[in-house]
Amino acid sequence: MTQLHDTLVEFVQVLRTADVKVSPAETLDAMEALDIIGIENRVLLKNSLSMVLSKNPEEKEAFNTSFDRFFSFNKFSPESDAAEPDEHNHQDDGEFDPESEAPNQQSGQGGQGGGEGTGGGAEASEELDFEQLEAQSELGKLLLSGDRMEVMIKMAEAGRQVEVNQIVVFTQKGLYTRKIMEAMGLKGLQDEVGELQEEGGRPQLYLAGQLKGARDHLREQVRDYVEKQFFLHADESGKQLREELLKKVKLSNLEKRNFKDVQEIVFKMAKKLVSIHSKRRKTFKRGQLDIRKTLRSNMQYDGMLFDLKWKSQKVDRPKVMCICDVSGSVSNYSRFLLMFLYSLAEILPKVRSFAFSSDLGEVTRLFQQSKLEDAMAKTMRDYGNGSTDYGQMLADFKSHILKDVDSKTTVIILGDARNNYGDPKSEILREVYDKAQRVIWLNPEPKSSWTVGDAEMKKYAPCCHQTEVCNSLVHLERVVGNLLRVAV
Amino acid sequence: MAIKNDDKLNDIEAIQGHFESLGYICSVEIATAVYLAYHLEKPVLIEGPPGVGKTELAKTTADMLDLPCIRLQCYEGLDESKAIYEWKYGKQLLYTQVLKETLGEILEGATGLSESVDKLHSFGDVFFSKEFLEPRPLLKALEAEEGCVLLIDEVDKSDHEFESLLLEMLSDYQLSIPEIGTVKAIPGKKPLVFLTSNNTREISDALKRRCLHLYIPFPNADLERQIVRARVPDIPPKLNQQLVAFIQELREMDLKKVPAISETIDWARTLILLHSESLNPELVRQTLNVILKFQEDVETVQSELQGVTNRAIKAT
């Protein structure tokens, strides 16, 4: 049973790399289910595990492919034998058991068992008229016994031992094949073959030949096994590795071909934030009477009901205004900030976004109505050229939008504050600062260069509640997360 | 667990058979879910498009086991006072009145404040006790003496808070009432819990983790024919075949709301009422509003009606 459970744990690991979230508690449930239904009925097993382990349609799909891939390796031994000349074994799996048991019963005749295992030896066994030798090394004995199941189990065990599920790149296949062979006792086998060859008698040479054949056959099987493991584990974990990297890389260094991946990551991150923050509520002084609370709190007044309690609750959503510099150097950051904010539409319904390089323009509707890529391209076309002028931007903001800013509004400005030595007009930002709930300045440049050259961060920073370096997805996530946390 | 008629849950084929005799045709997955739910003592979260028989599964299970089916319909704003328990406020107030009048007797012989308070403490506190408790569905399900089937319908319509309230019930089959303590299910009579969801929002992971997850998709043609036959026994086989072929093709089309099994059954009943033996375009046109619930869907289908009907007729 523990063997089964170990296999199950491995399977759960595979599921996790395939993006099915499985908690330890669910693993335990799966074990319990396994104990109840057994493993004889494959369809039943699949259905049951699917119910316990995968909890939405996408996960179910991932589960199905993983299940088929993972448990296919149980059939693998007879299958790979099908390539052998041995006709009887591969006709169907049912015949396979009695046949492989037969040589075990004739315990003296290791030769015939070996014939089963290595294939080519079947005819040879008939000409055997000399005394049979038995393999001495453990692996040799196992291989010549012809018990495929046992070999399989041994292989899986060895695989576990050398942690074949850590395989990451394709080129490691050879390495892991050798490691598994060694873990299974290859050395003992080699030594035995060497000894037998040195002794040089006919029976010895015959046995050596058999062992060699069995070894080569085993190597093939192991290679096959490793390959399957690679497809199970590495494919996905390679993806995870890439995702982790992409999260940390500077956004301006991202190449176009990575955008799709990044977008996926952004959606994932956004979804996480949504699920964390969508529950925020606060009690409100209106709506249905909460009798229970009212009675409770009025008990102290001798049951006179005058301190009324209400049931209604109101979800408080932050109002966000986002001003993005879309001039060449910063446009990439703006792209991802906007991507992030619009992925959060569920909990941030009131995002207004503006783009500028010198003149400020509202792009809210553009982003709501068209696809991100198109909206971004249009924004760049309309606002992206011209030299950066933060002063002009703030003046525009004041004349058109400042009236909409209230004490619940968070204003996010994303830009490098490089003003080409123009008038920064930081007094306008001061006005915004006084009116808004919060002003956050996100700067993609490292802090050390905030005051170098034409950068005006020094003047702007005092008019912001918060200034942050923001140049990777991780930063973005943190900023947006904070925004949601404090916004209530 | 040892609830009534639990021998009917001994193997999966038997469950399927019993369901069938009650007019509920189900796939192996569904029967497996019921089987596991009982033997693992786990609630089942059923998801799937509307009208595939999610709620029906719970009701049929209750029928099969001859147990009461306690239903809790979820909606926005559902809270513990409607789902778990409520105090009988009126009676509680009356009780305090009575208490006030008999205060003299209780405190008789006590001198000074501390002694009175001591006496008051030694007097049993009934204000928050089971006598004044009004059980709601969840508590009722725990206290059901024979065991029961608890159906928490459309759990996705409730609020996040309510989901959290359910967690204790679902994982440990117990409920905590702050004033009284923990109420546990009668050992061996734990309720069989079904939750249904239409996926209008994502159910939290915490809830999902505690449940078996069953996804019921639209049935394939074969299963759907069986279902129609079971539900509308007098349907001519030919009509049944045509009707199911028609519906199956509709599901492939780009519609706002595709017809579900319940609509197939309604349609079958309608056609029987109209004494029709087989489909024809005119008949379909007249009865289309039984299976399609949006005008724009009706219009979409009407333009292709001839072709679809002919294909359905040919299929037999």
Image: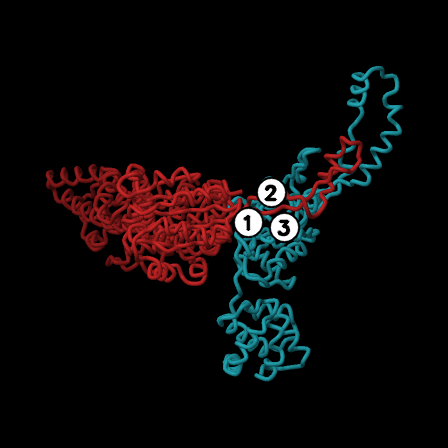
The tag earlier along the polypeptide, 3 or 1, is 3
- Circle 2: element type: strand
Q: CA distance from mark 3 to mark 1?
A: 14 Å
Read off the chain for label 2. A
Amino acid type at circle 2 is Lys
As drawn, the chain in cyan is: B
Residue B7 tag number = 3
Both labels 3 and 1 in a single chain: yes
The picture places residue B139, in percent across and down from the top left corner, at 69, 43
- Using the image, determine if residue A208 lies above or below residue B287: above
- Circle 2 is placed at which residue position? A282
Pick the residue in front: A387 or A36. Answer: A387
Q: Nearer the viewer, mark 1 or mark 2?
A: 2
- Chain A colour is red
The picture places residue A24, in percent across and down from the top left corner, at 46, 40
- Using the image, determine if residue B254 lies above or below residue A88: below
The picture places residue A299, in percent across and down from the top left corner, at 76, 33
The picture places residue A179, in percent across and down from the top left corner, at 24, 40
Decide if residue A26 is on the left or right side of residue B160.
left
Residue B88 tag number = none
Amino acid type at circle 3 is Asp
Q: Residue at point 33% right, 42% down?
A: A456
Amino acid type at circle 1 is Leu
